[in-house]
Image: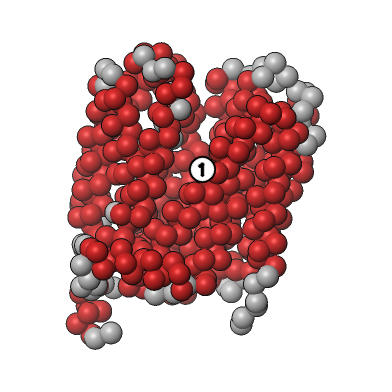
Amino acid sequence: MSLSATTRETIAPQTISPLMTFLFAAACGLVAANLYYGQPLAGPISASLGFSPAATGLIVTLTQIGYGLGLLLIVPLGDLLENRKLVLTLIVVSAVALVGAALSSTPMMFLTASLCIGLASVAVQVLVPFAANMAPDATRGRVVGNVMSGLLCGIMLARPFASFVAEGSSWHMVYFVTAAFMIVLVVILRATLPVRVPHTKLGYGELLASMAHLALHSRILQRRALYQAGMFGAFSLFWTTTPLLLASPRFGLTQNGIALFALAGAAGAIASPIAGRMADRGLTRAASALAMLLGMSAFLISHFTTDGSLTALLLLTAAAILLDFGVTTNLVCGQRAIYAISAEHRSRLNGLYMATFFAGGALGSAVGGWAYATGGWTMTAWIGLCFPAFSFLLFLTEKHRK
């Protein structure tokens, strides 16, 4: 790569301050949370707008579909377009979509807004490789881990936040408040984010074609994406079904009680910077193996949580924390590994990585709902165990290279 190309790609020196890292983490958390507000609000939204029972699931599904499309069609633009402008544009679109959701008076209006919220929320997956590009090689894992801790906090806190605001006001207010968050975030990021112009000169069609080449020929990407697909499948299955278990007569928790339980899962974000530091020290294999073993242990522990006692609730909480630690650790190790493949392909690699394990998460949610309805928590926990076990068995086939 020529000196001029390097200069164009990285305007600022390759370093990132603790304050800037915190800003990236906070931005990722606030934007990622937009994907999850609809989950605890599906009931009130359905009743308010007149959704049929069969169509209520679309409140969450359309947001997920939009996010999946964005991972494949928008995130790769981070290797082509100036990153700061792309991020700001996406966050402005998300603010407009959130206001649209708040003002919706028909199911079609709300579902259209949900699709747009999902599409625009991929701003977080432009921000993560943006931060990675600003970090030197020696500390890239730590920086990515710190940024991902903010993203994961946003994901885990979104549901209880939405529940508390909706109970105190209405579901409309949740979307108005979060739209205001996006507007403030745009103002802050516009004043603080550096300019980064990638040197890639491909057309958009060529950019997408290059993603197919990466998906077919990058063994590291393939493996790390499949490892995380299994782990995220377990994560999605667990968090789709535990609210059903906790709301059942066995536990009898209220919506606020379930929201408080979800807060425990946010503790998993602590693992993110730890995993990044381990990856920087060359301990990716050890951290990945530990992550998958934690995922399996979480579901084994959860088999002892079916009697509805206080001990059972504490064990289920411990399982949630262990699982979130495992998923987060494996996620950060995977990102550290794929970002090392090629600096100029980082956004495309990130989009493929995220899209693959997002599909695993969708499978986990679907299977989890069926398993709980068919065989209760016992069947659900055994199927949940299969997801990290798949990742671990695949991991054991990996040839160790120094």
- Return the residue nearer the eye: 79 or 211: 211
Above or below: residue 111 compared with residue 30: above
Left or right of residue 37: residue 285: right
Disc 1 crowd, CA 10 A, few/some/many (<14, 14-19, 20+): some
The residue shown at (20%, 55%) is 85
Residue 399 on image: x %, y %: 65, 77
The residue shown at (49%, 58%) is 145
Left or right of residue 267: residue 286: right
Above or below: residue 159 compared with residue 335: above
Quadrant placement of the C terminus: bottom right
Above or below: residue 304 compared with residue 334: above
Q: How many marks?
A: 1
The residue shown at (65%, 27%) is 373
Residue extending furthest toward the bottom: 2
- Return the residue nearer the eye: 39 or 130: 39
The residue shown at (70%, 62%) is 393
Residue 94 on image: x %, y %: 27, 39
Residue 176 on image: x %, y %: 29, 26
- Return the residue nearer the eye: 202 or 276: 202
Quadrant placement of the N terminus: bottom left
Q: Is residue 215 visible?
A: yes
Kindly identify which residue carries mark 1: 362
Question: Which element type, helix, strand or loop, lies under badge 1?
Answer: helix
Q: Amino acid at mark 1?
A: Ala
Q: Is residue 26 visible?
A: no
Q: Quadrant of residue 401?
A: bottom right
Residue 114 on image: x %, y %: 33, 33
- Return the residue nearer the eye: 185 or 98: 98
